[in-house]
Image: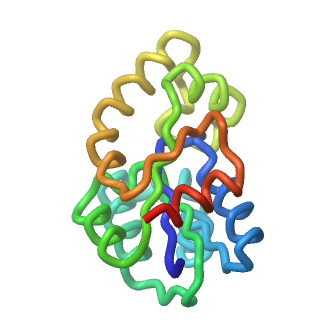
Amino acid sequence: MGLIFFTGFMGCGKTKWGHKLAGHLGYECIDLDHLLEAQVGMTIAEYFSSFGEDAFRKLESDVLKLTEYPENTVVSTGGGLPCFFDNMEWMNAHGKTVYIKLSPKTLVDRLEKGKAKRPLLRDKHGDELLDFITLKLSEREPYYLQAKYIANGIDMSVEYLEQLIAAV
């Protein structure tokens, strides 16, 4: 299958399912957020607050495009990565892209606990968090929907993902 990129909103399960699918297929697994943090020596939240979102998005795009990926690798991307520069187009040209789709309400339920490490969510609660995720998802989904495969994030399994990706 080669290179597989997981995309979708934060909290949809890109990292979790990236590791599970990679293990199932005997592939390498790369989390671009973790790779980026290792390269700059700080967390994404620290980088965001030190240099701003524009600098972060440029760095994120560079890490995506300049990384030398092993032949068979599952890559988990950051939630915003597909929406900047030509990143989605680049991923589609270099591998198979999978959008893990979830509703705003499901995303809120998943993200409520881990907001501290997510700069865009840190100070939002309840309806404000739901409104923010609904708005951001509506902005980002046109990019996510450019993925070659759309996965229902509720009923996920490695077998489902393998069948979805192999269906072409």
Residue at the far left: name it: 85
Question: What residue sits 36% from the left and 76% below the top?
Answer: 62
Q: Could you say which is closer to the camera, residue 53 or residue 166?
A: 166
Above or below: residue 62 compared with residue 109: below
On screen, residue 109 above or below 71: above
Q: Is residue 145 above or below residue 91?
A: above
Q: Locate the C terminus and report the quarter of the image it occupies.
A: bottom left
Residue 28 in sight here: yes
Which of these two is toward me, 90 or 79?
A: 90
Q: Nearer the viewer, residue 37 or 71?
A: 71
Q: Colour scheme used in the picture?
A: rainbow
Residue ID at (55%, 51%): 45
Q: Is residue 25 left or right of residue 53?
A: right
Extreme residue in the top direction: 127
Relative horizontal placement of residue 154, taking residue 121 as reference (left or right)? right
The residue under the point 36% across, 78% down is 94
How many numbered discs, if any?
0
Rendered location of residue 26, percent (x, y): 74, 79
Q: Is 135 left, or right, of 76 in this rendering?
A: left
**Horizontal placement of 114 versus 105: left or right?**
right
Give the quadrant of residue 64.
Answer: bottom left
Image height of 113 relative to 42, above or below:
above
Q: Position of residue 161 (x, y in %)?
A: 61, 56
Horizontal and vertical percent position of residue 102: 52, 33
Residue 11: x %, y % from top left? 60, 40
Could you tell me if residue 49 is visible in this image?
no
